[in-house]
């Protein structure tokens, strides 16, 4: 009986792993398709072969405790081209990643919050110890949705971390991840370094 239970558990775990890998694979295919659909995209179809990702790892999909922030003032988040964009701190999140306890901040764009389509969009930019080695030196981003916060928790999946457009081309206003989201560990999940030639807009 114990052997059957063990086998069932093993099959269940394998099925979960496969379905999760499929889910991330679909997410990445949709991510690539968006470059082709977006008229402002720095990449064309032929450039997509130069996009690379870490292998899917479910240990980088974590449930974080959320502390909503109140009466936060708008601040200017610097961008890589020297300008800035208006944001405010929406929440702090406590999570465990790779055996370490981390505190990160979720942001909300003032401009996007006025757009009905993006009013619940939350922005999680971060840097980590893979930057300039295996991943883009300027850090990576994760998109979240305020509606996904349930019982003061939200799921954060670092397998969905992606590069800003500035990783592929100049001429874009990509926010620089604030120091409070500088992680003192290597996040080996999500998008890796782009291996194509960086483009220059005229």
Image (cartoon, grey):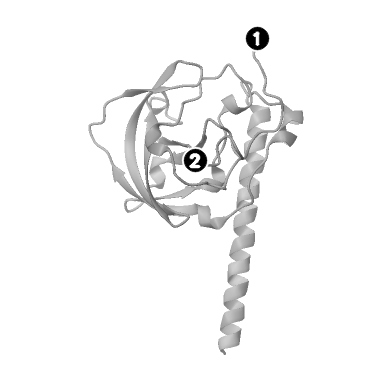
**Category of crowding for the residue at label 2, using alpha-carbon neighbours closer than 10 angstroms: few (below 14), some (14–19), many (at least 20):** some
**Category of crowding for the residue at label 1, using alpha-carbon neighbours closer than 10 angstroms: few (below 14), some (14–19), many (at least 20):** few
Numbered mark located on residue 202 in the image? 1
Front in this rendered view, residue 185 or 104: 185
Question: In the picture provided, is 97 more to the left or to the right than 9?
Answer: left
Task: Please tell me in which quadrant of the rendered image residue 180 appears.
Answer: top left
Task: Please tell me in which quadrant of the rendered image residue 146 appears.
Answer: top left
In the rendered image, the residue lying farthest to the left is 71
Q: Position of residue 44 (x, y in %)?
A: 72, 26
Could you say whether the residue bearing mark 2 is in a helix, strand or loop? loop
| Residue for point 51% across, 24% down | 174
Q: Is residue 142 above or below residue 117?
A: below
Q: Where is residue 121 in the image (x, y as percent from the top left)?
A: 43, 35
Q: Position of residue 83 (x, y in %)?
A: 45, 15
Quadrant for the C terminus, please.
top right
In the rendered image, the residue lying farthest to the top is 202
Q: Position of residue 191 (x, y in %)?
A: 60, 40
Q: Earlier in the sequence, mark 2 or mark 1?
A: 2
In the rendered image, the residue lying farthest to the right is 46
Q: Is residue 150 above or below residue 14?
A: above
Question: In the picture provided, is 73 more to the left or to the right than 47?
Answer: left
Q: Distance between the residues labelled 2 and 1?
A: 32 Å
| Residue for point 33% across, 47% down | 66
In the rendered image, the residue lying farthest to the bottom is 1
Numbered mark located on residue 9 in the image? none
Front in this rendered view, residue 177 or 67: 177
Residue named by callout 2:
128
| Residue for point 59% across, 63% down | 16
């Amino acid at each position: 009986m114990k052997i059957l239970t063990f086998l069932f558990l093993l099959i269940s775990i394998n099925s979960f792993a496969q379905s999760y890998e499929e889910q991330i694979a679909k997410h990445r295919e949709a991510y690539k398709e968006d470059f082709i659909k977006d008229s402002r995209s720095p990449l064309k179809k032929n450039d997509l072969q130069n996009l690379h990702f870490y292998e899917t790892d479910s240990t980088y999909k974590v449930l974080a405790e959320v502390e909503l922030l109140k009466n936060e003032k708008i601040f200017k988040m610097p961008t890589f081209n020297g300008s800035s964009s208006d944001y405010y701190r929406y929440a702090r999140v406590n999570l465990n990643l790779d055996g370490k306890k981390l505190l990160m901040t979720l942001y909300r764009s003032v401009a996007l919050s006025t757009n009905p389509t993006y009013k619940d969009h939350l922005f999680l930019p971060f840097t980590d110890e893979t930057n300039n080695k295996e991943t883009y030196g300027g850090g990576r981003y994760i998109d979240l949705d305020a509606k996904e916060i349930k019982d003061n928790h939200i799921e954060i999946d670092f397998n969905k971390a992606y590069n800003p457009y500035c990783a592929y081309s100049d001429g874009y206003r990509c926010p620089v991840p604030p120091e409070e989201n500088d992680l003192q560990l290597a996040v080996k999940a999500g998008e890796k370094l782009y291996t194509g030639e960086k483009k220059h807009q005229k």
